[in-house]
Image (tube, rainbow, N blue to C red):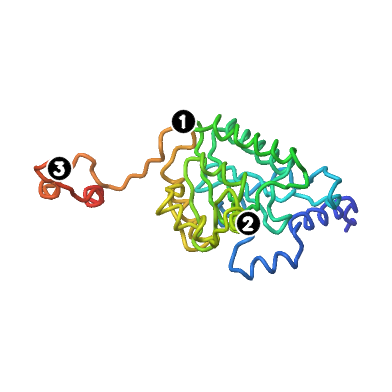
Amino acid sequence: MAEEDPRILELRERRAKAQKAGGEERIAKYKAKGKLTARERITELLDTGSFNEVELYSSHRSEDFGVGDRIETDGVVTGFGTLDGRTIYVYAQDFTVMGGALGEVHGRKIARLMDLAAQSGSPVIGMIDSGGARIHEGTRSLWGYAQIFRRNTLYSGVIPQISLVMGPCAGGAAYSPTVTDMIIMVEKQSFMFLTGPEVIKSVTGEIIDMESLGGAAVHLGTSGTAHLTAPSDKEAIAVARRILSYLPSNNTENPPFVDTGDDPDRADEELNHIMPDNANEPYSMHEVIER
């Protein structure tokens, strides 16, 4: 049996290392909090074995402020796969790599993925878990955000864009999800705000915790920014899968059709009793839909 090419072995080793870019210790600490890693989240979303990663070996080019070490993936996993047989593009920020902070290459990876999704007419799912801009890179990180925001608006109404906020979402990281079609937040785990409790305390003197400032309950019940919440990563991903099952892949297609055996032209006498004669009298829309 011929020996395997050492270059292939080297490539496999490099790939395995890149897939655990945050390091075993950080990954273990992250999982100890009951969270799925970025790669586990993607695996949970897509059909088994369908994920194809792009730009695995990308890393930042900054040399300043002690960030000279090249960390592959640059803190975000990007690629495509299938969900119930349909092509889906997905990116998941990796909090175990530089806190998921967005830099130039990180932003470029997401922007390129969105371009690929639009070109193929496929939905794009973002799994947000980021401390915000990578300050070490200065204006380069802001360039990365600008590329993402531009595509959020260009592709709005063209392909479905869904954001799963699965961890902290501070500063610039909070802007992109709010202009996508839907936000799903994980309860007691995800937060969205422009600046955190410590900054608020230093500026205004107000003491507030992260949950009260920008937790899932606040954005679902008060600000209206979030559309849905779920108690865990897995359940949030299940919600996203269900939502996608209702949506077309792009603006030129019809929504998926499922034959339920329920005749859309059937009559239902109960509707005569549910709907009031007085237009000013309230009634349950949920009951009408369920009928």
SS type, badge 1: loop
Residue 43 in the image, given as x and y percentages of width and height: 60, 56
State the residue in front, 234 or 262.
234
Count the numbered circles shown: 3
The residue lying at 55 percent from left, 45 percent from top is 125
Residue mark closest to the camera, 3 vs 1: 3
Give above or below for 269 relative to 168: above
SS type, badge 3: loop
Please name the amino acid that badge 3 sits on. Asn
**Label 2 CA crowd tier, 10 Å (few <14, some 14–19, many 20+):** few
Give the labeled residue for mark 1.
251
Sequence-wise, which precedes: disc 2 or disc 1?
Answer: 2
Please name the amino acid that badge 2 sits on. Ser
Residue mark closest to the camera, 2 vs 1: 2
Give above or below for 198 relative to 135: below
Residue 57 in the image, given as x and y percentages of width and height: 78, 47
Image position of 220 (left or right of 125): left
- Tell me the distance, in whole angstroms, between the alpha carbons under discs 2 and 3: 50 Å
Image position of 17 (left or right of 128): right
